[in-house]
């Protein structure tokens, strides 16, 4: 199954667009993998994240654009970095529910044919991107989502009141840092695997 429209033109047009993500640039830890995928004729990346740690307040509306991010890091974090979050809770500047989340690496990749897409999916799953699959079939391309399995999510406060101890929050951060290391290793392994892909 091969799409005949100009995939290369679509790829070129997409890759010169301004990065519209909240960060505004590609994470350093995943840059090498993104560049590798984009160097292959049959693929291009449409979004990526190397894994991150978040502390955020969910509005009553549950609207994504109204989420208040108290901490967002694509690097390992220390407990001191999240202390400001606790101070904000105590000062009642944050009254909605607050969550801590660590999420693993994720990429969205377009391919110009199904065979190549399946080959990339198999390579990704083999190195630990186990939650990966095809998410759409369009006229010009197959779009895949490659997702690593590292994940932590826990509520920190309810209605402005801390519901976990500082010790437990420290455990969440420590475990999150360990999982970030794991997801970064999978990124490197996938890049090595793609170096062998013809």
Image (tube, rainbow, N blue to C red):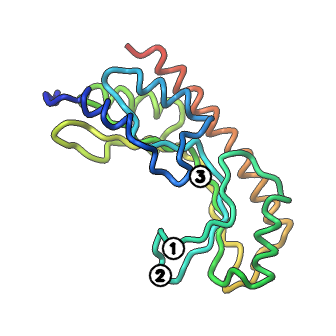
Q: Which mark is residue 175?
A: none
Q: CA distance from mark 1 to mark 3?
A: 20 Å
Mark nearer the viewer, 1 or 2: 1
Mark nearer the N terminus (3 vs 2) = 2
Residue 142 horizontal side relative to residue 88, left or right: left
Position of residue 169 in the picture relative to residue 103 (left or right): right
Rendered location of residue 160, percent (x, y): 71, 84
Q: In terms of image quadrants, where is residue 28?
A: top right
Q: Secondary structure at mark 3?
A: strand
Q: Residues within 10 Å of mark 2 (few under 14, many from 20)?
A: few
Above or below: residue 46 compared with residue 36: below
Q: Residue at x 83, y 58 (%)?
A: 79
Give whichever of 165, 12 is nearer the camera.
12
Q: Looking at the image, do the residues carrying marks 1 and 3 touch, with CB atoms under 8 Å apart?
A: no
What mark, if any, has residue 103 been given in the picture? 3
Tell me the residue that label 2 is attached to.
61
Mark toward the viewer: 1 or 3: 1
Residue at 20% in and 43% down:
138
Check disc 1 and report its element: helix, strand or loop: helix
Residue 186 sits in quarter: top right
Q: Are marks 1 and 2 in contact (CB under 8 Å)?
A: yes
Where residue 10 appears, as percent x and y from the top left, is 26, 34
Residue 66 shows which numbered tag? Answer: 1
Given residues 145 and 88, the one toward you in this image is 88
Mark 1 → mark 2, Cα distance in angstroms:
8 Å
Q: Nearer the viewer, residue 10 or 127?
A: 10
């Amino acid at each position: 199954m091969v799409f005949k429209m100009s995939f290369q033109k679509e790829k070129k047009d997409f890759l010169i667009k301004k990065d519209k993500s909240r960060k505004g640039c590609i994470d350093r830890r995943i840059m090498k993998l993104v560049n590798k995928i984009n160097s292959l004729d049959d693929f291009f990346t449409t979004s990526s994240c190397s894994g991150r740690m978040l502390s955020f307040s969910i509005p009553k509306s549950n609207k994504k654009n109204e989420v208040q991010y108290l901490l967002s890091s694509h690097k390992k974090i220390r407990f001191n970095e999240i202390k400001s979050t606790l101070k904000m809770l105590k000062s009642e500047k944050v009254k909605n529910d607050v969550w801590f989340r660590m999420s693993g690496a994720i990429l969205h990749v377009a391919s110009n044919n199904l065979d190549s897409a399946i080959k990339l999916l198999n390579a990704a799953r083999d190195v630990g991107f186990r939650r990966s699959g095809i998410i759409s079939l369009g006229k010009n391309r197959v779009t895949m989502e490659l997702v690593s399995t590292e994940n932590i999510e826990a509520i920190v406060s309810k209605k402005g009141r801390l519901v976990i101890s500082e010790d437990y929050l420290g455990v969440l951060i420590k475990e999150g840092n360990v999982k970030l290391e794991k997801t970064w290793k999978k990124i490197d392994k996938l890049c090595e695997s793609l170096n062998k892909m013809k």
